[in-house]
Amino acid sequence: MAKQVKNPQGSYTIMTELVLPNDTNPLNNLMGGRLMHWMDIVSAITAQKHCNRIVVTASVDNISFEHPIALGDVVTLEAKVTRAFNSSVEVHIVVKGENIPSGKKYASNSAFFTFVAVDQSGRPIDVPELIPETEGEKELFDGALRRRQLRLVLAKRMKPEDATELKSIFKLDTIDKGEKE
């Protein structure tokens, strides 16, 4: 049976939340943990849309807090699958804040989450292939293999010398061959 093929737009998910007092820290800004919770939810929905399966969070890349989101502001989380591997998918999430009374919109965060699709017994299962369409989708797709290899190396699930995509970034391929720059 041929593997199903999907595009990133088919997994696109947008989630909107209002920052309420219970969501904030003593400075009246959205707590980082609450934001990460929302990011996990929107990215899980996105991964499930692509896989048509139950998914579990496998990894979360660096989350940098670029701009605090204040009490009363609206949080918009946008996510879509950037690449599908055998049983896993990478999801990119972009978080924006908006102060509606002032009309001010601002970028807050972005991150990559990885999910594994599982069957009813919790075993990994194959996922549909992803074919990027736009230039931005193609850039994210191309970078996903490097990000995946970096995740695996950091988790000690891949030897650095086996990370072929990373070798080219750090010019390790020329060092391996004994060539001098």
Image: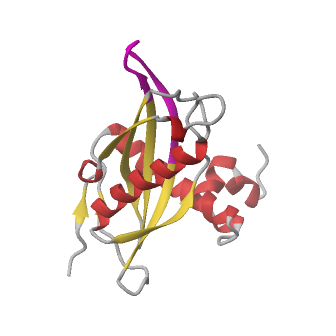
Colour setup of the view = secondary structure
Above or below for 180 versus 88? above
Q: Main secondary structure of the magenta part?
A: strand
Q: Residue at x 62, y 65 (%)?
A: 152
Q: Residue at x 35, y 76 (%)?
A: 126
Above or below for 140 versus 102? below
Q: Residue furthest left?
A: 1
Counting from the top left corner in percent of width and height, residue 36 is at 53, 48
Q: Residue furthest top?
A: 102
* Of 65 and 25, the residue lying toward us: 25
Check if residue 175 falls in the magenta segment: no
Counting from the top left corner in percent of width and height, residue 15 is at 34, 43
Above or below for 145 versus 120? above
What's the magenta region? 97-111
Q: Residue at x 52, y 35 (%)?
A: 21
Q: Residue at x 25, y 73 (%)?
A: 3
Tell me if 22 is positioned left or right of 47 in this view.
right
Q: How many marks?
A: 0
Q: Quadrant of residue 55?
A: bottom left
Q: Quadrant of residue 68?
A: top right
If the image is split into quadrants, where does the N terminus sit?
bottom left
Q: Residue furthest front?
A: 21
* Of 4 and 52, the residue lying toward us: 52
* Of 62 and 174, the residue lying toward us: 62
Counting from the top left corner in percent of width and height, residue 122 is at 43, 82
If the image is split into quadrants, where does the C terminus sit?
top right
Counting from the top left corner in percent of width and height, residue 124 is at 43, 79
